[in-house]
Image (spheres, grey):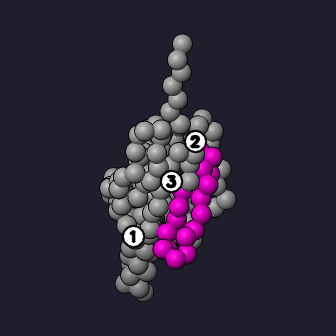
Amino acid sequence: MKKMMMFVAALCVVSVAGALYASAAKVSAAASTPEYSLTVNGRVVEVKRAEQMPYEQKGTVMVPLRAAAEALGYKVSWIAEEKAVKVDESIQSALVKEGSTEAKFTGKLKIINLTQNVQLPAAVQSKKGVMYVPVTFFEPFFNEIIVKEGNVSISAQSATIH
């Protein structure tokens, strides 16, 4: 009987220790993946689902393309023939495809040609119907990008003459 009680007690200790270890591993994994909020032109972008939030992948912060672009006032459209997303802004547009590390920008500002292929630091990804791009995708649109303390901030650069 004593052996049975010792066995049951040992089994309980092992079970509790295993559960605590698994719980600690989940907390550690969550702590190593920072969560980000998205701010565009000083306003926090509210998303419908938590999985639409910016995230970090191998050192690159990825943002939801449509949410960020539309908050900047850009038009976003799906180009079925090319299986690509087109982002239009007043002076230029960009075309990106899932899995690609290149964005194709086209446009012109008076005599300045804005047409260029831009290498992205990570591939464009689609998760649960949401396309994500590296936050640096928005720099050629003349935006300032700041990633600091769990916040991704994208702001249109402006200049004034006094």
Look at label 1 and name its amino acid.
Gly
Identify the residue position indicated by label 1 in the image. Answer: 99
> What element does badge 1 sit on?
loop
- Is 119 or 25 nearer to us in this picture? 119
- Farthest-out residue, front: 111
The verdict on residue 73 being magenta is: yes
Q: Residue at x 44, y 69 (%)?
A: 98
- Farthest-out residue, top: 162
Q: Indicate the position of residue 160 as horizontal and vertical percent values.
A: 53, 21
Q: Disc 2 or disc 3, which is closer to the eye?
A: 3
- How far apart are the alpha carbons under marks 1 and 3? 19 Å
Q: Work out which quarter of the rendered image holds the C terminus and state it.
A: top right
- Is 24 or 30 nearer to us in this picture? 30
- Is 161 or 143 nearer to us in this picture? 161
Does residue 150 appear in the picture of this structure?
no
Magenta segment range?
69-87
> What element does badge 2 sit on?
strand
Q: Say few, some or many: other residues with alpha carbon within 10 Å of mark 2 (under 14 / 14 to 19 / 20 or more).
A: many
Q: In this rendering, would 144 be left or right of 47?
A: left
Indicate which disc residue 69 carries. none
Q: Work out which quarter of the rendered image holds the N terminus and state it.
A: bottom left
Identify the residue position indicated by label 3 in the image. Answer: 93
Q: Indicate the position of residue 151 as horizontal and vertical percent values.
A: 50, 42
Q: Residue at x 57, y 68 (%)?
A: 78
